[in-house]
Amino acid sequence: MKLDLAVAALVLLSALLHASWNAVVKSDADRLLSFGVVMMMGTVIGLAAAPFVSFPAWEAWKWLIASVVIHNFYYFFLLRAYAVGDLSHVYPIARGIAPLLVAILAGRFVGEALETREIAGVLMVSLGIVGLAFSRGMPRGKEWHPIGYALLTGITIAGYSVVDGLGARASGDALGYIAWLNVWEGPWAFIFAVWRRGGATIPYLRQYWWRGVGGGTVATIGYGIAIWALSLGAMAHVIALRETSSLFGALIGAFILRESFGWKRVAAASVMVAGLLLMNLRFG
């Protein structure tokens, strides 16, 4: 199954939006509260949209509930990765492992067998993105900690991507699934952040509410596009294309957050782009 050009363009936009809100959280003085507000904004948007979309079919709710659980593990691992590592380091690892895992899981659970050329493309995408993360050389000692958290993050990314693809297809209306997923997914991180920060919550919100609201809006739109695309196209193709967010994340880390970026990462990005072309374009 091939992606329509317009769908592919929207998935690329989703990738850019995802990298952007991750940069917002990573650069915040209080990542936990920032992340909580981002997620709570998703709930607000979901509640606002719910009256205007179809209620998901009951067959979709097992996937929706599973997604909420997996997403909360994802949030924990992601925040831990950002606590001990750079955006341009941990973000590409987390996003890079997902396409390969999704290709395996999609083939196992929904029968989306990939051609040999497409498998090679998925491998190139994954190797290229992981190469972005390991461009500084082999880590030592505690340098493995952010990598470990990033790998766990990537596993949860693959898990919720497949689950949400199945849920959106079973729901009968991908937009309804997206809205209700946001309703149930969002509050928990915010409740936990308020519980941990206590009296510091109100002063933070007064000063930095706009970061969470902006980041939450971007995050909700970005993942909404991804779920919609997952309901239309082959999962491995959608996720591989969306994981170009790794390159966006590395560039944002390098030029906006002032994290290092060298020629090795450029070479790795070239491998990733070649893999995307191999996966999504037919030659001859």
Image: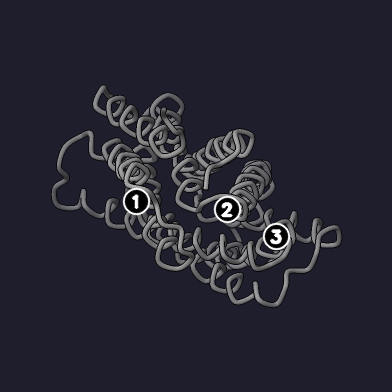
Residue receiving disc 2: 230
Q: What residue is shown with label 3?
A: 43
* Residue sitting farthest toward the front: 284
Image quarter of residue 183: bottom right
Q: Residue at x 17, y 45 (%)?
A: 139
* Residue density around tag 1, few if under 14, some if 14–19, many if 20 or more, within 10 Å: many
Instruction: Specify the label residue 149 is tagged with.
Output: none
User: How far is mark 3 from mark 1, CA to CA?
Assistant: 28 Å
Sequence order check: which comes first, mark 2 or mark 3? 3
The residue type indicated by label 1 comes to: Ile
- Answer whether labels 2 and 3 touch (C-beta < 8 Å): no
Residue 45 screen position, x and y as percent: 75, 54
Observer-nearest of 21 and 62: 62
Name the mark on residue 97: 1
- Residue 284's quadrant in the figure? top left
185 versus 102 height, above or below: below
Amino acid type, callout 2: Leu
Of the two numbered discs 1 and 2 in the rendering, the one whose residue sits closer to the viewer: 2
The CA span between labels 2 and 3 is: 21 Å
| 234 to 86, vertically: above or below | below
As helix, strand or loop, the secondary structure at mark 2 comes to helix
Q: Quadrant of residue 269?
A: top left
3 or 1: tag closer to the N-terminus: 3
Mark 3: which amino acid? Thr
- Relative to residue 144, is residue 211 drawn left or right? right
